[in-house]
Image (spheres, rainbow, N blue to C red):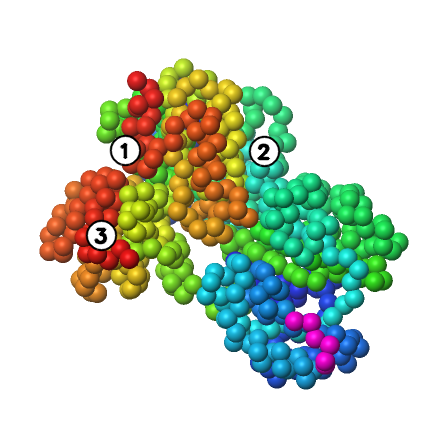
């Protein structure tokens, strides 16, 4: 098995007629992802790639297609609204790729997410500012939702969760080169206020029978890695190998990602590495050793 | 994005957050005139001249002067302050040149407090923090006496409720001053919250917030950072930007759509993706730190950079005199390796390659990318992994004896 997405995931693409949306929708279709609908306000009635119907609203799209997951390529001014629309339409998983959403918008989105009642209908958000989520597999078995290069992945038993895009590809490339496949790879994104946290994804991996080990990639800023360390210590019996980017990052500077900033002396890589090691996770000494570090723990 | 104190105070005024009366001054004449105007308009005998730079800790560095000798003395002080290199704990040892002053009415205060609003990433809400320890660094208070910081979190749907502001006010002991002090604080905090949301601030700080003799509270200082992600709905921000306060290389990179941060080291880095770019800096320091080899910059060309952007990025690195070697580290997903390779070759041919270049390419179209590099005739050392590349670039710098 896998977590969050699999062969039965029915995907709605919001912003499917835009530049990034159409490019990546095609890539996802090529990978074998079941894209059942698209949504662009004002473009309802069109057909994408002569097979995917496009709707004006997410609600229409979900009602007509039975989509349960949405992926968002809407530009920043409308992206938070698109997330809220997907939740309202009944999608239980919303993956937001968009980079550059104002934090005030995300605070309101989080408020809506957190106000949902518990249960299977509760929507989860991945991202924003993330590569997406992939459960590798051959056509009809796998599911790629996002912008990651599908061909570097292999199906298998290692889960990957990360705040960074290309660093995830780096980890996946290392795993695949060692002949180690992946159960699911989740990019939780680089924004300060976002959806799923390390802890929630680690919990899903811990409960997934087919995940035998996890690579977790963090970076400077915030305290999500420290919370993850507490969870690893208290709740996990599967090996977790980590890498924390930004040991050399100067304080007070935003390093690309909106969330990657050491503010008021808080959120340093050293702090995060200390708490993860104390929790029993192994921290790779360099980003070149992520896969071998996990491999050494799984033997 | 950061702005100056006087700009922040102008925004405060618009939203009804009380501030002392003041005028910005770019010249000595303007400073003197500001003092004359302030005295005429407010009757104040005390004027404060404050250096406007983006760093904090100005007072200790000599960037804030309280003046009792009228406009003539303001002029003298302005003469010495304009153009000085102001060194504070936030500027680094070389300091920041003072180009603007703020001349302000002096007020008689009975108490200094701290009020700040930040995005609390753990709670995913705006947090208001208040402390009786005003006028000192809040980081120091947080580290040494965290119990002296009062915090409330704001529900984005309800906004800052009056009871929350009252919790802070009574917690600060404001009922000890005048009957109106608590109400005055509640009004100020509500106005500040409205400002933070509407103006898309990522941080807003008043240090110190002061209680005046008459019991009113006033923002004696003002600091605002904007959330860069929201710039599309604030065209007015461009006018508030002070280019003198920003690193010219970082500004240039921003214009080209690149993420760039200058560092002190000697290895130029060109990477795709922010996380990988940070990790590349880390691995250079890992292998080279003890040998004096460290990264000269953070540079993320992004997920879908064009050949022109790569060329521009490479030029920026090449033009920095501190760069003794270059490490290009690409894991091409959406970014195709041949695009990167073509950009590098074009830039290197145009400018000449005066330092060793190590390239690690992986991912989409990698074979094509490697072919372009080897066919270029340039002296490029090719690496198979990040570690291999980092070791090779460290070797290149130390072999040249250029690490120092």
Mark 1 → mark 3, Cα distance in angstroms: 30 Å
Please give the label number shown on residue B398.
Answer: 3
Quadrant housing residue A53: top left
- Asked if labels 3 and 1 touch by Cβ distance under 8 angstroms, the answer is no
Name the foreground residue: B73 vs A132.
B73
Which residue does the numbered mark 1 point to in the structure image?
Answer: A173
Mark 2 → mark 1, Cα distance in angstroms: 33 Å
Res. B306 visible in picture: no
Tag 3, which secondary structure?
Answer: helix
The reply to whether the magenta stretch includes residue B68 is yes
State which mark lies toward you, 1 or 3. 3
Which residue does the numbered mark 2 point to in the structure image?
Answer: A113
Q: Is residue A126 left or right of residue B66?
A: left
Q: Position of residue A113 (x, y in %)?
A: 58, 33
Q: Is residue A229 left or right of residue B133?
A: left
Tag 1, which secondary structure?
Answer: helix
């Amino acid at each position: 098995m896998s977590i969050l997405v699999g062969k039965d995931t029915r995907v709605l693409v919001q912003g499917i007629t835009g530049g990034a949306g159409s490019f990546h929708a095609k890539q996802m279709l090529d990978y074998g992802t079941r894209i059942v609908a698209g949504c662009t306000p004002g473009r309802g009635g069109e057909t994408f790639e002569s097979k995917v119907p496009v709707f004006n609203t997410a609600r229409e799209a979900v009602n007509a297609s039975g989509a349960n997951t949405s992926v968002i390529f809407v530009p920043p001014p409308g992206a938070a609204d698109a997330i809220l629309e997907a939740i309202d339409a009944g999608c239980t998983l919303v993956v937001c790729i968009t980079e550059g959403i104002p934090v005030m918008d995300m605070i309101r989105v989080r408020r809506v997410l957190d106000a949902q009642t518990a249960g299977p209908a509760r929507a989860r958000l991945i991202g924003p500012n993330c590569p997406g989520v992939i459960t590798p597999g051959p056509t009809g078995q796998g599911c790629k939702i996002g912008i990651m290069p599908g061909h570097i992945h292999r199906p298998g038993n290692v889960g990957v969760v990360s705040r960074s895009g290309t660093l995830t590809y780096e980890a996946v490339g290392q795993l695949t080169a060692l002949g180690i496949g992946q159960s699911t790879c989740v990019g939780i994104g680089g924004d300060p206020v976002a959806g799923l946290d390390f802890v929630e994804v680690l919990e899903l991996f811990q409960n997934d029978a087919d995940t035998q080990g996890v690579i977790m990639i963090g970076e400077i800023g915030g305290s999500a890695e420290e919370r993850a360390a507490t969870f690893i210590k208290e709740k996990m019996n599967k090996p977790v190998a980590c890498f924390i980017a930004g040991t050399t990052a100067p304080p007070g500077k935003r390093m690309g990602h909106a969330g990657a900033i050491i503010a008021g002396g808080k959120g340093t890589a050293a702090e995060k590495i200390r708490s993860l090691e104390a929790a029993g996770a192994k921290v790779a000494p360099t980003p070149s050793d992520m896969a071998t570090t996990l491999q050494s723990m799984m033997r | 994005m950061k702005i100056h104190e006087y700009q922040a105070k102008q925004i405060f005024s618009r939203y009804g957050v009380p501030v002392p009366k003041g005028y910005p001054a770019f010249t000595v004449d303007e400073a003197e005139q500001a003092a004359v105007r302030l005295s005429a308009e407010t009757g104040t005998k005390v004027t404060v001249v404050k250096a406007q730079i983006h760093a904090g800790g100005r007072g200790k560095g000599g960037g804030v002067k309280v003046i009792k000798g009228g406009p003539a003395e303001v002029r003298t002080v302005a003469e010495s302050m304009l153009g000085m290199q102001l060194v504070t704990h936030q500027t680094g040892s070389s300091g920041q040149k003072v180009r603007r002053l703020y001349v302000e009415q002096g007020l008689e205060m009975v108490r200094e407090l701290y009020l700040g609003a930040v995005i609390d990433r753990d709670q995913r809400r705006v947090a208001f923090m208040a402390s009786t320890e005003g006028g000192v660094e809040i980081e120091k208070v947080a580290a040494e006496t965290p119990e002296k910081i009062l915090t409330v979190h704001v529900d984005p749907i309800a906004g800052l409720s009056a009871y929350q502001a009252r919790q802070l006010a009574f917690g600060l002991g404001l009922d000890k001053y005048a009957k109106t002090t608590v109400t005055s604080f509640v009004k100020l905090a509500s106005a500040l919250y409205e400002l933070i949301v509407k103006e898309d601030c990522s941080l807003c700080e008043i240090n110190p917030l002061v209680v005046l003799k008459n019991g009113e509270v006033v923002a004696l200082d003002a600091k605002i950072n904007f959330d860069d992600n929201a710039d599309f709905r604030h065209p007015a921000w461009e006018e508030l930007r002070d280019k003198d306060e920003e690193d010219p290389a970082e500004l240039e990179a921003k214009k080209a759509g690149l993420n760039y941060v200058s560092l002190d080291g000697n290895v130029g880095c060109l990477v795709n993706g922010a996380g990988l770019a940070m990790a590349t800096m880390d691995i250079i320091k890992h292998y080279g730190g003890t040998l004096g080899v460290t990264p000269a910059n953070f540079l993320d060309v992004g997920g879908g950079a064009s050949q022109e952007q790569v060329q521009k990025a490479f030029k920026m690195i090449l033009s920095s005199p501190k760069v003794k070697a270059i490490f290009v580290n690409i894991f091409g997903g959406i970014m195709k390796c041949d695009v990167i390779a073509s950009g590098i070759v074009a830039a290197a041919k145009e400018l000449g390659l005066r330092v060793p270049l190590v390239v690690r390419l992986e991912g989409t179209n990698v074979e094509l990318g490697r072919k372009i590099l080897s066919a270029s005739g340039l002296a490029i050392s090719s690496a198979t992994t990040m570690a291999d590349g980092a070791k090779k670039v460290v070797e290149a710098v130390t072999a040249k004896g250029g690490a120092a």
